[in-house]
Amino acid sequence: MNQKEACAEVKTMLEEMQKISPKLKDLVDSEGNLEEIKKTKEVLQDILHKHRVLRRNLKEWERRSKKIQRIDKIAEKLKKEGDDADLSVDELHALYKQEMRGFDSSSPFAFSYYAHSETRGLREKRQIEGKTKEDYARIYGCKPEQVTSEEDDVFEKNSNIVVFIGDIDFTKKELPKTLKHVSGNLQSDSKNAKLPKNLEYVGGHFTLKELQEIPKEGLDLQHVTMGGVLNLSSLESAEGLKLPKKTQSLYLSSLESVKGLVLPETLAGDLSLISLTSAKGLVLPEAIGGRLKLRSLTSAEGLVLPKTVGGDLYLRSLESAKGLVLPETLGGDLWLTSLTSAEGLESLDYTGVRGIVWPPKAFSDKDKEKVEEIKVEQEKKGINVTFF
């Protein structure tokens, strides 16, 4: 959807609501016929339902726009007042602890990379001006000496470093208990990786890809702000794991059970649960910005998908479409390459599917005919769904 199309859809929604809303108000104010009020209310609900994707996009766009405006105000202040500009702690938080990654999309509702690059540019400028250590010290209430970009400072004996600017690999080393902030990637290939309890922020990717079991004391990440991918791809059990409320992408590729699993409320990128064989007890976020990988599920029983999936939806092992309820918005392709028949496909709501539906190549002629019939029926409803 381009900007012109988006504006037209917004205009259509407003015009439809303007026609029906005053009528409903007049009926209620005049204590009109209850049956007529009911019918008018149903018409309004149908309008809202029809434009549900648009309304959600507008709400998300508004939220992201406020973040962009905040960064723009800080940039303007720095430009106007120069190197000596006095930024408040709140402004410093927005500049150093607010990750805003964008999406490579032509949609006017997509979050452009401009905000992310602008934030990064302002940080780099502060670093060139020698302001970074002082900024971080004010944010965390520590000394400038506790802020460093030298890895040796982090791993020296009795280190009290609070902020590290850069990437850290602590595979064969232990992080200081005082560490709260890592501006770049944080990773370990150790099966016994341990994190400082005070950790609050990781600006890049956070990788513990060899961690198979949660330590006895648990792994509490719920207060950690994640700027990039959280990779726990070898973890076999979620018991004792507390995930952050928000992260970019999350890889739990070896998890076979949802026992103890509480997923983040918001995922801007991908969610990989490729080893999960049952959806029973699985509670997914309401929205996932990237791909959702559930490629080992053989049945849709108990599966409640997010309302929005921005990328592809992988259900490659699903044997039947019966009971499957698609997201209201699916920005990518739908992979159903293991279906044993086309039965159940006719019951799916394809309204929000933006990509291609991939049924099995080995479908029988009868199943292929049914798919063609489904396409015709969807076209009659004004829905243009593509089966490959």
Image: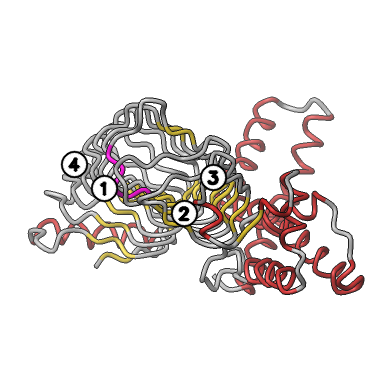
Residue 96: x %, y % from top left: 68, 57
Q: Nearer the viewer, residue 202 or 165?
A: 165
- Which residue is found at the position 62% from the left and 58% from the top? 148
Task: Indicate whether 258 appears above or below 361.
Answer: above
Left or right: 290, with 12 as reference point: left
**Which residue occupies the extreme front position in the image?**
157
First-in-chain label (4 vs 3) = 3
Left or right: 365, with 197 as reference point: left
Residue 241: x %, y % from top left: 41, 32
- Badge 2, how many Cα within 10 Å: few under 14, some, many 20+? some
Q: Which amino acid does label 3 sit on?
A: Lys
What's the CA distance linking mark 1 and mark 2? 24 Å
Residue 207 is labelled as none
Q: What residue type is labelled 2?
A: Leu
- Which residue is found at the position 64% from the left and 30% from the top? 38
| Bounds of the magenta segment | 208-212
- Badge 4, how many Cα within 10 Å: few under 14, some, many 20+? many
Is residue 4 within the magenta segment? no
